Image (cartoon, rainbow, N blue to C red):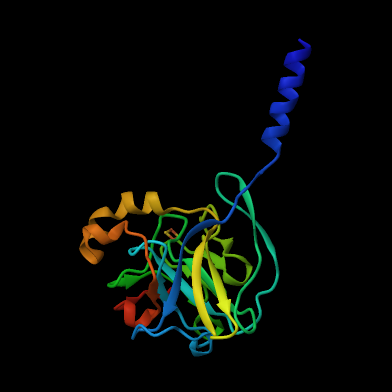
């Protein structure tokens, strides 16, 4: 009886204490411009959507210069109840952030043909869209890129997975080193296997990016951007 009471109390304690999620490290990859030259942080236009692929060759991410410091540390929680801390942007003004561009609701993502999800500044926001958010027009999930990809509205069950970025003050260059938050890559590959094989090729779909990855303006990457 005594043993049971102790075990039950321990179990309850374990249930209550949220798990702390560690960053997941992948290859350290240099971000480059479209010509394969190291990208300079100074070249990123504030408010513009840039896409790069990381940590897999078929998984798109947003690179954003928010145009204002994102220095607030934010506690976040994944759908399965793990906690983690996002520590802010990088770059000269801590205004540069990276996120997986896969919506955590039903995994809408930017393809070369069409994108329902993008960052919208004040000038391009609409009646259904808060300014300065990443908004998915599929079912209107909205994320705060200045707060670790936190969910602001809509059906998304967890924040966007953040991409860990390193900034080199000497060269003004950027590297991606891993992810932080709830990853959805396995579900993404399972759901879109056929489509990803057409767009990226079967062997590239699940291949991890190595060495460098190109940063492309979303307008160049994607033929049609859906606005809502
Ligand atoms: S897939 Fe983005 S809101 Fe549903």
Report whether 68 appears left or right of 172.
right
Q: Quadrant of the N terminus?
A: top right
Classify 12 as above or below 67.
Answer: above
Classify 17 as above or below 119.
Answer: above
Q: How many numbered marks are there?
A: 0
Looking at the rendering, the quadrant in which ligand 1 lies is: bottom left
Q: Quadrant of the C terminus?
A: bottom left
Query: Quick check: can you spot residue 131?
Result: no
Query: Quick check: can you spot residue 140?
Result: yes
212, 139: nearer the viewer:
212
Q: Residue furthest right?
A: 2
Please provide percent x and percent y for residue 161.
51, 60
Report whether 114 appears left or right of 87.
left
Residue drawn at 49 percent across, 83 percent down: 124
Please provide percent x and percent y for residue 86.
63, 63
Classify 183 as above or below 211.
Answer: above
Quarter residue 58 falls in: bottom left
Please provide percent x and percent y for residue 167.
57, 77
Report whether 11 appears left or right of 143.
right
Residue drawn at 75 percent across, 25 percent down: 9
Please provide percent x and percent y for residue 83.
64, 50
Classify 2 as above or below 96.
Answer: above
Residue drawn at 38 percent across, 79 percent down: 218
Residue drawn at 33 percent across, 78 percent down: 221
């Amino acid at each position: 009886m005594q043993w049971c009471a102790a075990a039950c109390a321990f179990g309850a304690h374990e249930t209550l204490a949220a798990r702390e999620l560690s960053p997941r490290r992948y290859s350290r990859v240099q971000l480059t411009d479209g010509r394969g030259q190291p990208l300079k942080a100074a070249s990123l236009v504030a408010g513009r959507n840039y896409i790069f692929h990381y940590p897999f060759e078929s998984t798109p991410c947003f690179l954003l210069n928010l145009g204002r410091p994102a220095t607030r540390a934010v506690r976040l929680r994944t759908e399965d109840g793990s906690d983690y801390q996002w520590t802010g942007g990088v770059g000269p003004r801590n205004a540069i952030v990276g996120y997986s561009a896969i919506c955590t609701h039903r995994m809408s993502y930017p393809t070369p043909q069409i994108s329902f999800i993008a960052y919208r500044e004040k000038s391009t926001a609409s009646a259904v869209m808060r300014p300065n958010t990443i908004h998915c027009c599929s079912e209107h999930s909205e994320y705060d890129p200045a707060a670790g990809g936190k969910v602001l509205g809509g059906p998304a069950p967890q924040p966007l997975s953040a991409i860990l970025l390193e900034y080199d003050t000497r060269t003004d260059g950027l590297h991606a080193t891993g992810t932080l938050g709830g990853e959805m890559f396995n579900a993404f590959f399972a759901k879109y296997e056929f489509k990803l094989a057409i767009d990226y090729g079967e062997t590239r779909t699940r291949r991890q990016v190595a060495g460098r990855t190109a940063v492309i303006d979303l307008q160049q990457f994607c033929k049609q951007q859906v606005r809502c």
